[in-house]
Amino acid sequence: MSFVYPRSYVGIIGGGHSSWQLANAAHKLGFLVNMLLSDPHDLAARAADRVLVGSCNDVNLLRQLANASQVVIYTNEEVSVNAINEAQIADKIPQGTELLTITQDRYLEKAFLEDHNIIIPPYAMVVSLADIRGVIDSIGYPSIVKPIQKGLANQSHYLLEKPEDLDRLENHLPDGSYILESWVPGAKEYTIMVGKDQDQKIQTFPILETVYRNGDFHSALAHQKNEPELMTEIQRVANEIAKDIHYQGLMSISFFETQAGLLFVKGIYSGTNEAADLYEAVSGFSQYEIQLRAICDWPVPDLYLRQEGALIALATSVEPQVFAEIQRRVNWRFTFWPLIQATGHHQPTLGEAVVVASDYQGLLELLSGTELW
C-alpha cells in the first residue's frame, strides 16, 4: 500500500466506540470516511461521511466499501477472513488477514503462542459439558469457559470456581466449541500496543496497567512505578509475537502477572484497544492517529510518557456518580459518547474520564475519594 493522501476516503468495517474515535481521528488528518455498519443507528455512523448498512461479512458490501475507499481498516474480529478473500479486497487492507486469522480463533491463538514458546495458562478445547468434566481436574479451579470464536455478540464467558459450578452449566451452555482455561485470581494485568509499518518495522508503545471487573474493562494506568525487569520482559515477548505475524498497523497483547511473579500472555487482539485511549493524554498522540499513520504509510512517532495518567471507563450503572464527579473534578478530562450503545454481553458505557499528573503520587491524590476508581 502506497502513501494515502489527505482528502482520500478511508473505509472502516464495524462500528462502536473505537470506530467512532477512529473516524474522528481520520477527519483531523484530512481523510473522508466510509463505513460498513450492521446498524444504521450505530454510534460510529455519526462520524461517517458515507454509510453502507449490512453485515460486515456481506461480500458485495465489502466490495462496495473497498471500491469507494483508498484503504480499508477493520476495527474488531467480527469480519471473517473468508469474506475478505471472497470479496477479493485484501489489497485494500494493509492490516492483512494473518493477524485476523490468529485473533479471531482462541484455539489458533493459543497454538501460535505455544509454537513460539510463549507462556500461557493451561487450557483445553471443549465442545460439551461432558468434555469440561473430563478435563477440569487437569486445568484446575478457578477456570473460565470462553467461545473459541471471538467477536460473536451475546456469547458469555462462564467462570468455574468450584465443582458445583459445573451443575449450573447444565442446559445453559449453547452448542459450539469452547476454550476452557485456567483463571488467574488476584493477578495484575498489563496491555502493550505493538505497531508495524509497511516495511514490518516493529514499534512498541507505553505499557499500561489495566483493571477488569466482571469481565468488563474498568481502568488503565500509565506510570513508571512498575518493575523495570517486568516491563523489559513484556516488551521482549511482544516483539517475539509481532515479528512472526505479518500485519500493518496496531495490535495489542495482554498479560497476567501472578502474585508469585509469573508472567502469562492472556491474549492477542487486532487493532486499537480501549485501554490505550489513555495515550493521547500521556504521550501527545492518540492510538487512532497512530493506527491511521501506520496503515496509510505515514511516519509513526515513538511514544514516551510525558506525564503519568489514568483512564476510567464510565459505566452506565454509575451514571449518578459520574455526573456528581463532573461538578467536583476540575482536573479530570471527560469524554462522553453521543450515543449509549450496548456491546454484546458487556456493560455499556457513557464515555471515559482521564486524569493526569506529573508523578505517581500526585496521580493517586487526584484519584482519591471517588467511587469511580
Image: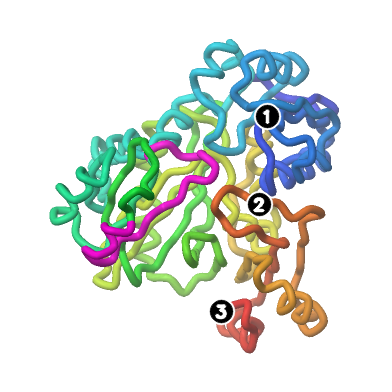
Rendered image coloring scheme: rainbow
The amino acid on which the numbered mark 1 sits, given as a three-letter code, is: Cys
What percent of the width, then of the height, locates residue 70? 73, 20
Rendered residue at 57%/35% (across/down): 249
Identify the residue position indicated by label 1 in the image. Answer: 296
Dots 2 and 3: beta carbons under 8 Å? Answer: no
For the residue carrying disc 3, how many other residues have a C-alpha within 10 Å: few (<14), some (14-19), or many (20+)? some
Q: Rate crowding at label 1 as few (under 14), some (14 to 19) or many (20 or more) other CA atoms within 10 Å.
A: many
- Check the image and report above or below for 236 versus 110: below
Is residue 36 left or right of 220 when viewed as pictured?
A: right
At horizontal 53% and vertical 70% (from top left) the residue drawn is 223
User: Secondary structure under badge 2?
Assistant: loop
Q: Which residue lies at the image location 26% right of the left edge and 57% below the top edge?
A: 166
Of residues 129 and 371, the one drawn nearer to the viewer in this rendering: 129
- Ranked by sequence position, the earlier of labels 3 and 1 is 1
Nearest the viewer among 173 and 363 is 173
Task: Say whether residue 162 is magenta.
Answer: yes
Q: Compare residues 60 and 359 and report the one nearer the observer.
A: 60
Q: Main secondary structure of the magenta part?
A: loop
> Which comes before the other along the chain, label 2 or label 1?
1
Give the CA distance from mark 2 to mark 3.
Answer: 34 Å
Task: Give the side of residue 241 with respect to residue 337, left or right.
Answer: left
Q: Disc number at residue 360?
A: 3
List the residue tagged with mark 2: 342
Which structural element holds mark 1?
A: loop
